[in-house]
Amino acid sequence: MARPRLAGFRPALLAGLSLVLLLLGIVFAFAAEEARRFGGESVRVVPFASGLDHPWGMAFLPDGRLLVTERPGRLRVVDATGRLGPPIEGVPQVAARGQGGLLDVALDPAFATNRLIYLTYAEPRPDGAATAAARARLSDDATRLTDLQVIFRQQPAYSGGNHFGSRLVFAPDGTLFVTLGERFDLMDKAQDLSTTLGKVVRIRPDGSIPDDNPFRSTPGARPEIYSYGHRNVQAGAIEPGTGRLWTVEHGPRGGDEVNRPEAGKNYGWPVIGYGRHYSGAQIGVGTHKEGMEQPLFYWDPSIAPSGSAFYTADLLPAFRGQLFVGALAGQALVEVKVRDGRVIGEERLPLGKRIRDVRQGPDGALWLATDDTGEILRVVPAPAK
């Protein structure tokens, strides 16, 4: 009689397990929304949308809806209720392998009148893939892209699947920064001005080169290069008040860096760096070399930074002027504490999820995209007790 008893017990056991899992889900959901102290504020982290496939970049439309890239190659609109729209037509083909795919998205500063958006992505080429930037016009009903134009192509392409970068950041003067990786296996090319591997480049929105770029007149150098010696820059933001670009880049085993790139300067990779190579070997000559810049701040061990935003809104007043960075390996939102252009420390809000992008929303909340769970989260004030 053992078999009948066991067979009759299994549905009850499964039902009991299902109930336990449901209750645990409710507990965890409640825990995600409970008040926590972070950055001088009492905050809650609340879910907004789910069901995305490796969301990578976010940009807010003027009506408050959200454009989100998915790394496999889709661009979607998320409406005010958190509902995902269908994939937008006309997105360029991407090399969706390894860390490659559809990456960042940004709106033209004059989007309200010209409907232009910008994308970075791993572009498939006959000799491999490389990061490209394109601009296109978003239809009035936000269902398709037209007039797609590639405005930048990283050189050279490579068959590997790592370190594509890439963030898009508009400067106050209307020029566009594109942050780039050095494709991992080609790390030495970060020091080679004849390539755009491991560089921050600066272009006009149509892809032309600004007259005051630092290497425009340097023989053999790529004229779009703004700064060099970078590893894999997946975060960039403009500092309020100064208009200066800040970037955050991945180190290997330790050595993630916060930098403030300046025209023509060398940020050291792979000659200098903090942390070590994955093999355990020392990086280049160590941590310092004359003629190479030091980071404003670094992490060791690594947090794997991706996405960043300076906070300028009023909803969370203690956040104002601070830099917020997503952490993939660190599974947290990180506040980089900034005073008078210097970094004086950091604070973390553990989330248990890989944070791929960070944006300030029109509502004043901080919006986060999770790489692993495919969610959009909001960091908002906790209700007063």
Image (spheres, rainbow, N blue to C red):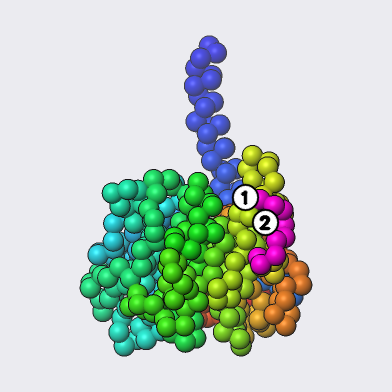
Percent x, y of residue 120 = 39, 64
Residue depicted at 57% across the width and 37% down the height: 17
Query: Can the viewer see residue 183 in this picture?
Result: yes
Q: Nearer the viewer, mark 2 or mark 1?
A: 2
Quadrant housing residue 239: bottom right
Q: Real-space Cα distance between discs 2 and 1?
A: 9 Å
Where residue 252 is drawn, which disc sits there? 1
Q: Nearer the viewer, residue 166 or 18?
A: 166
User: Which SS class for mark 2?
Assistant: loop
Specify whether 54 is left or right of 320.
left
* Image vertical order of residue 283 relative to residue 216, above or below: above
Q: Tell whether label 1 touches label 2 (CB within 8 Å).
A: yes
Q: Residues within 10 Å of mark 1 (few under 14, many from 20)?
A: many
Residue at x 50%, y 76% (from the top left corner):
214
> Principal SS element in the magenta part?
loop
- Quadrant assignment, res 366: bottom right
Q: Position of residue 133 (x, y in %)?
A: 37, 67
The residue stretch that appears in magenta: 284-292
> Label 1 amino acid?
Pro
| Closer to the camera in the image, 186 or 383 | 186
Q: Position of residue 99 (x, y in %)?
A: 46, 51
Of mark 2 and mark 1, the one earlier in the sequence is 1
- Residue at 60 percent across and 57 percent down: it is 269
The residue tagged 2 is 273
At x 61% / y 86%, what residue is drawn? Answer: 242
Q: Considering the image in quadrants, where does the C terminus appear?
A: bottom right
Position of residue 80 relative to residue 109, above or below, is above
Q: Is residue 242 magenta?
A: no
Amino acid under disc 2: Gly
> Residue lying furthest top in this view?
1
